[in-house]
Amino acid sequence: MRLSISMTKWLKCLHLLAVTGWVGGAISLLILHFLRFKGVESGNELYGIDRAAHLIDMGVVVILGAFGCLLTGLLYSALTNWGFFRHRWVLIKWIITIFCILSGTFLLGPWETTMLNISHKFGDTALEIVKYNSSMYLNFWFGVLQLILLIFAMFISVFKPRLRKMTNLTK
């Protein structure tokens, strides 16, 4: 079964909406990190930043964007001529998508939850707690890596590079 041209355009719109949510959410989370780095004035402010990050990430924007990309990407690959493995750039996008969802689920999310729980319990003294700081810096740097990968996936979607065959890479 293949989608009609009209249905493919609707799917593309949904995919772009999901990408916008995921990337926009990732940028928002990095901005919130800079608020933490500039120095907070109270425990309520730190907890507010962590609560906002948690809501953006797990409550509304990022999780819906990520799974929206996954679902629309599956539909694109299964119901259009792009396929899953026909083009290497599509395979690279799949690898990036799966990596970002898994790292978000098993690394970024738990670090964020740790920060939220510690700032809720200890207020501004949370910044003196090693576990909070290690979670904050790991979350920041892995978040930067994830954002770079997502932007790279966006660029290869637009430019659709023709990648040389693996055998030609060694010559």
Image: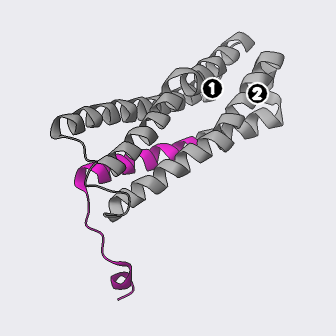
**On the rendered structure, is 141 left or right of 117?**
left
Give coordinates of residue 18: x percent, y percent: 39, 32
User: Of helix, strand and loop, which one carries label 1?
Assistant: helix
Few, some or many C-alpha atoms within 10 Å of disc 1 (few <14, some 14-19, many ≥20)? some
Q: Is residue 11 visible?
A: yes
Q: Position of residue 141 (x, y in %)?
A: 59, 45
Q: Residues within 10 Å of mark 2 (few under 14, many from 20)?
A: many
Tell me, yes or no, whether the two marked residues, 1 and 2, touch with CB atoms within 8 Å.
Answer: yes
Q: Nearer the viewer, residue 43 or 84?
A: 84
Whether 25 is drawn above or below 90: the answer is above
- The numbered dot on residue 127 is 2
Q: Is residue 101 magenta?
A: no
Q: Is residue 141 visible?
A: no
Q: CA distance from mark 1 to mark 2?
A: 9 Å
Which span is picked out in magenta?
Answer: 142-171
* Residue 104 rendering spot, x and y as whole percentages: 60, 41
Q: Which mark is residue 36?
A: 1
Residue at image coords 25%, 67%:
162
Q: Residue furthest left?
A: 5
Q: Main secondary structure of the magenta part?
A: helix
Residue 51: x percent and y percent? 65, 18
